[in-house]
Amino acid sequence: MKQKIVFLKEEEIPRQWYNIAADMPTPLQPPLHPGTGKPTVPDDWAPIFPMNIVEQEFSTERWIDIPEEVLEKLLIWRPTPLVRAYALEKELGTPAKIYYKNESVSPAGSHKPNTALAQVYYNKEAGIERMTTETGAGQWGSALSFACSLFKMPLKVYMVRISFDQKPYRKILMNTWGAECVPSPSADTNFGRQVLEETPDTPGSLGIAISEAIEDAVSAKVNTKYSLGSVLNHVMLHQTIIGLETLKQLEIFGDYPDVVIGCVGGGSNFAGLTFPFIRDKIYGKEVRVVGVEPTACPTLTKGPFLYDFGDTAATTPLLTMHTLGHTFVPPPLHAGGLRYHGCAPLVSQLVMDKLIEPLSINQVDCYNAGVQFARTEGIVPAPETNHAVAAAVAEARKAKEEGVEKTIVFNLSGHGLLDLSGYEKHLNGELEEYSLPDEEIQKALTVLEPYPKPKV
Ligand SMILES: *Cc1c(COP(=O)(O)O)cnc(C)c1O
């Protein structure tokens, strides 16, 4: 029998995270204070995050120990399997070898608990008594609810109202793990009440939900902090366990990739899989690293590299990133996820340095690949994940046309069992191949004109 899966043993789980800030050819430009325009210092971040997490955000230490209590809880589902997709290869008739790292086996169904557990641990260590966050589709809210339940940390999740109404199962999942979940805008914050008064029928937005979660954290009577599930350096760091495991597993398969692929929203699952490979690349190894996004939200492929806010409400420090402008929202006809206006500063800088190749794929091709994957390998990927699947399939087809063998590794960032409505639309032929027009991009970017520009 040919080897299909490599499971690592418990004791083979990586003991340290990899911090790519130690190896980047161009260091990150400093985040700027939104009020003064000056580079931020750790204290500027202290009202929102505990100091131990802020220290990680600023760290350039190459290897950072994973605390024992975090490792112990990661072992609930880690190490995750690395799987050879023989059936998909056969269906495609490709000489390429396709491997996927299966992050969908976590209790919340995605890679997000990798950072959620670490963040809740550090908050607990810092004496924080309660946490808040926002969630759009509900994946981050459920991952953080899961982590908070294991550490007995009270959590309040502000969920964008339209998702709250359309995705009741995510809320039930959060409640089952003991978190409170309210639709945003809510009557529980000043900002929420103000929005409700002006626009009682608003569907809500991620920007409103972030503002509510931050207002709650800074004004609550009990010692409360806020938590973010992507974009920031410490989140990328916590996700590198994915790629570090994958390197060990490929060694057992006796293989090394020609191309490593991940889907990119804020950048965390992509960074998690690829940063350890980018380290190899920096030190001379030949490997291509491809980040995939929707043509409806083409941040890396079409967005310029600028200073922008992490959130729609323009409250976070200004970060250097590829961006479409913080007020950009993709049109509602886009059903494939990955709707974030910007991208992690670490990922953005590595794109600038040509260590990452960005690629955009339209939603119809993404869902076609997801359905093909489901019908061969059995797992129904999350809509976001379909972008990585589609890029892997395209690489495998190219290998067939060119008659060359190659090794493809992609991240199966999550399953789609709680996000089936996009599949329904796709199967009914209701999705369009939509690309964001250049005029729309130019219009969206005007919001950034008054802000400082990064050095290039
Ligand atoms: C949240 C999510 C993403 C996008 O976020 P990143 O930070 O870019 O990884 C991708 N896939 C799944 C399954 C997700 O839940």
Image: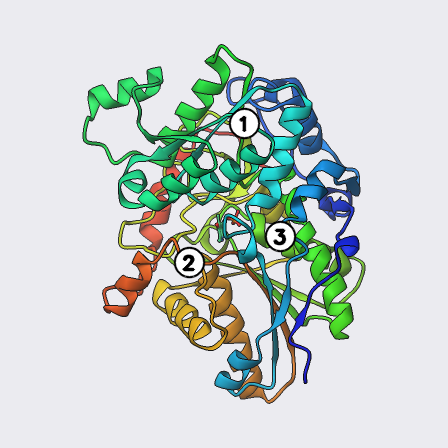
Q: Relative to residue 305, is residue 97 depicted above or below?
A: below
Residue at 27% x, 45% y: name it: 166
Give coordinates of residue 452: x percent, y percent: 53, 30
Tell me which amino acid carries mark 2.
Gly
Is tag 1's residue or tag 3's residue first in the polypeptide sequence?
A: 3
Which residue, as the protein is rendered here, is positioned at the far top? 221
Q: Dot 2, how many residues are within 10 Å of its Cα: few (below 14), some (14-19), or many (20+)?
A: many
Which callout, 1 or 3, points to the residue nearer the camera?
3
Rate crowding at label 1 as few (under 14), some (14 to 19) or many (20 or more) other CA atoms within 10 Å: many
Earlier along the polypeptide chain: callout 2 or callout 3? 3
Q: Separation of disc 1 and disc 3 at Cα? A: 34 Å
Question: Closer to us: mark 2 or mark 3?
Answer: 3
Q: Amino acid at mark 1?
A: Pro
Secondary structure under tag 1 reads loop
Q: Which residue is mark 3?
A: 77
> In the rendered view of the protein, which quadrant contains the C terminus?
top right
Q: Quadrant of the N terminus?
A: bottom right
